[in-house]
Image (cartoon, rainbow, N blue to C red):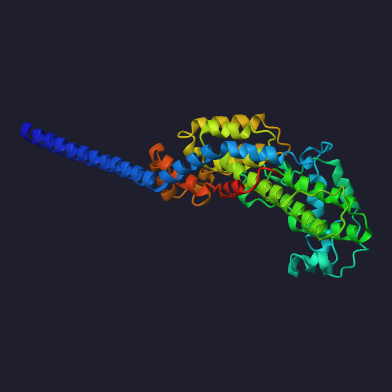
């Protein structure tokens, strides 16, 4: 090849290199512009909701603590209970009782005509219907007084090394427990011995509350509401029988439903710490578990932007005295957004490309988008403002 030919080849190579550099630079510029545009759009879409949430929890945190103090005046929260887990008994009994007869025997298995009351009867049938209850054995309820908490989702039931999705986890058949509580109270009133039954039902309510789940907490409130309604129907109830008032029951529900908001990673760190330090800490464990579930799910995308919130939430989780194993299981094995990606296409080219494109700059807006959908309203807490300060 002549000198001129070599020079022409080099020139063509330089031109191609410049074109390639310009092309790559153009693509990178477009990518940067797209990320900036996505940031701006995301901030406009979800930023106001998150900022409003932060303002709400900041404005309500003192009131939240006040409501727990008012609720904590109830003796039910301070009754002595021996330490112990009701899970090994209740989980198995409820599993067998709610399944087909060939599963075996359970003290919680009810006759078919009473199960029909659970499925098809109205909410008040249990107190007015003509029911034959003499064959029922309520002795199992006395055994529940040996426990102070209930691992409704025991650690042994979570496969090791696999993501644990609390949102879709299988919980015991709480509705069967509720029916038993109704029958226990109804039978005791007929026998003229309501106070013993009240103790049993309140203990079941305590164990449901001490599952450290929001669902369990709502079941506890339902059981205490059943007690109150039955008490209200009696002309001369025993003077020592003092159920929680409707105001206190509403306060209990508001505290549990709003507690996760105050532990959310979207809440200002100082607000979350203050809320979790409230005494008595009636909503702390439920709030920690719910907040940890969503926080763990978003952690691969959100940790960089919410580093302080994650540090405080994990520190308070580790220092908590929550009796069940649920909070630790969520942090150690909790389902994450990257697990969701893997489940919907691990190994295919589009999923690989998506993981490459999802830089930190894009992950944070996506995290905020998902986070904004998990933020719960504080309406139930605000409604308590209409109540008088007294229980």
Q: Residue at x 12, y 37 (%)?
A: 9
- Residue 328, given in percent of the width and then of the height, sits at 66, 36
Q: Quadrant of residue 177?
A: bottom right
Expressed as whole percent of the image width and height from the top left, the position of residue 311 reads 55, 30
Q: Is residue 189 left or right of residue 374?
A: right
Quarter residue 117 falls in: bottom right
Q: Position of residue 84 (x, y in %)?
A: 82, 38
Between 62 and 140, the one lying in front of the other is 62
Quarter of the picture holding the N terminus: top left
Q: Which quadrant of the view contains residue 164?
A: top right
The residue shown at (67%, 46%) is 251
Horizontal side, residue 230 vs residue 350: left or right: right
* Position of residue 270 in the picture relative to residue 35 (left or right): right
Q: Does residue 167 sit above or below 298 in this rendering?
A: below
In the rendered image, residue 321, in percent from the top left (x then y), is placed at 71, 32
* Residue sticking out furthest to the left: 4
Q: Nearer the viewer, residue 118 or 164?
A: 118
Position of residue 124 relative to residue 173, above or below, is: below
Report the label total: 0
């Amino acid at each position: 090849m002549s000198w001129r030919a070599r020079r022409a080849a080099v020139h063509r190579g330089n031109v191609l290199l410049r074109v390639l550099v310009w092309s790559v630079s153009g693509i990178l510029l477009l990518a940067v512009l797209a990320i900036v545009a996505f940031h701006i759009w995301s901030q406009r879409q979800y930023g106001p909701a998150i900022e409003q949430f932060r303002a709400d929890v900041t404005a309500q945190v003192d009131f939240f603590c006040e409501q727990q103090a008012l609720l904590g005046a109830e003796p039910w929260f301070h009754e002595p209970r021996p330490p112990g887990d009701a899970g090994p008994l209740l989980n198995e009994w409820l599993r067998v009782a709610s399944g087909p007869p060939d599963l075996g025997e359970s003290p919680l298995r009810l006759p078919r005509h009473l199960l029909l009351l659970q499925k098809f009867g109205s909410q008040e049938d249990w107190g007015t219907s003509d029911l034959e209850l003499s064959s029922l054995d309520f002795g199992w309820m006395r055994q529940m007084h040996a426990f102070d908490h209930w691992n409704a989702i025991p650690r042994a039931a979570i496969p090791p090394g696999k993501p644990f999705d609390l949102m879709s986890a299988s919980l015991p058949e709480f509705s069967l427990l509720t029916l038993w509580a109704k029958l226990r109270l109804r039978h005791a009133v007929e026998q003229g011995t309501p106070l013993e039954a009240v103790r049993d039902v309140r203990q079941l309510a305590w164990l449901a509350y001490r599952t450290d789940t929001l669902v369990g907490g709502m079941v506890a409130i339902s059981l205490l509401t059943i007690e109150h309604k039955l008490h209200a129907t009696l002309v001369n109830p025993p003077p020592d029988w003092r159920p929680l008032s409707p105001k206190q029951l509403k306060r209990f529900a508001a505290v549990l439903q709003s507690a996760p908001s105050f532990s959310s990673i979207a809440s200002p760190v100082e607000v979350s710490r203050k809320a979790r330090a409230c005494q008595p800490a009636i909503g702390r464990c439920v709030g920690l578990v719910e907040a940890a579930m969503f926080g763990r799910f978003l952690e691969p995308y959100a940790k960089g932007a919410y580093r302080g919130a994650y540090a405080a939430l994990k520190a308070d989780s580790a220092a908590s005295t929550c009796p069940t194993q649920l909070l630790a299981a969520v942090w150690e094995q909790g389902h994450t957004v990257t697990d969701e990606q893997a489940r919907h296409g691990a190994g295919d080219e589009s999923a690989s490309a998506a993981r490459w494109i999802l830089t930190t700059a894009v992950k944070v807006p996506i995290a905020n988008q998902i986070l904004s959908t998990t933020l719960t309203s504080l309406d139930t807490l605000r409604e308590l403002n209409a109540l008088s300060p007294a229980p």
